[in-house]
């Protein structure tokens, strides 16, 4: 195929794909992402208020709320509920800390049948590994800069 014919073929194919593809509902998707992401954050704020009322404060309070949200993110992933939330809310379920817990727990659950080491432990960090590596690297870099200043 020459360049002109190939270009025309690609345009025809793309035109066909656009006719078969349902239109994207941008406003609905954004509203669902905003609503679900906000709801997750409100639930986190509720836990914060309850733990603050129980007497926790400072770093202990922040760490406890994070652990609770991570636990519920992993629990809902294991029960298959978080996948349904993600299909409905899209990015709204990914952004909060529960989305990070889901991204670590999902591959671990999926590859559990391959064993503890090669399945769960190795696949657990396929999605979140880069985030963890760059997070640790950034923390070390900031710590070095802070100690030099």
Image: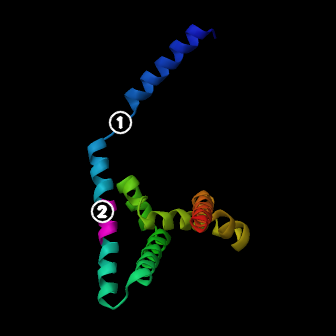
Residue pictured at 53% horizontal, 16% vertical: 9
Which of the 4 quarters of the picture holds residue 98? bottom left
Quick one: SS at disc 1? loop
| 3D distance between C-alphas at marks 1 and 2 | 28 Å
Based on the picture, tell me whether residue 9 belongs to the magenta stretch.
no
User: Which numbered disc covers residue 36?
Assistant: none
Quick one: SS at disc 2? helix
Residue 138 screen position, x and y as percent: 58, 60
Residue under pointer 2: 38
Circles 1, 2 touching at the beta carbon (< 8 Å) = no
**Going by the image, does 45 lie left or right of 2?**
left
Residue pictured at 39% horizontal, 53% vertical: 90
Q: Mainly helix, strand or loop, the magenta region?
A: helix
Say few, some or many: other residues with alpha carbon within 10 Å of mark 2 (under 14 / 14 to 19 / 20 or more): some
User: Of all residues shown, which one is farthest toward the front?
Assistant: 149
Comparing 125 with 10, the one in front is 125
Comparing 68 with 12, the one in front is 68
Indicate whether 75 appears above or below 21: below
User: Which numbered disc covers residue 22?
Assistant: 1
| Badge 1 or badge 2: first in the primary sequence | 1
Image quadrant containing the N terminus: top right
- Mark toward the viewer: 1 or 2: 2
Image quadrant containing the C terminus: bottom right
Residue pictured at 61% horizontal, 57% vertical: 130
Residue 13 screen position, x and y as percent: 49, 22
Q: What stretch is highlighted in magenta?
A: 36-42
Indicate whether 109 appears above or below 93: below
Which of the 4 quarters of the picture holds residue 54? bottom left
Residue 91 screen position, x and y as percent: 40, 53
């Amino acid at each position: 195929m020459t360049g002109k014919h190939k270009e025309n073929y690609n345009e025809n194919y793309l035109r066909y794909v656009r006719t078969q593809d349902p239109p994207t509902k941008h406003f609905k998707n954004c509203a669902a992402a905003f609503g679900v992401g906000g709801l997750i954050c409100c639930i986190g704020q509720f836990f914060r208020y309850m733990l603050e009322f129980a007497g926790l404060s400072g770093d202990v309070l922040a760490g406890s709320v994070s652990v609770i949200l991570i636990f519920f993110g992993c629990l809902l992933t294991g029960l298959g509920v978080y996948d349904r939330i993600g299909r409905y809310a899209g990015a709204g379920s990914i952004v909060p800390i529960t989305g990070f817990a889901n991204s670590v727990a999902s591959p671990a659950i999926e590859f559990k049948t391959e064993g503890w080491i090669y399945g769960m432990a190795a696949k657990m960090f396929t999605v979140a590994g880069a985030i963890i590596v760059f997070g640790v690297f950034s923390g070390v870099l900031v710590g070095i800069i802070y100690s030099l200043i």
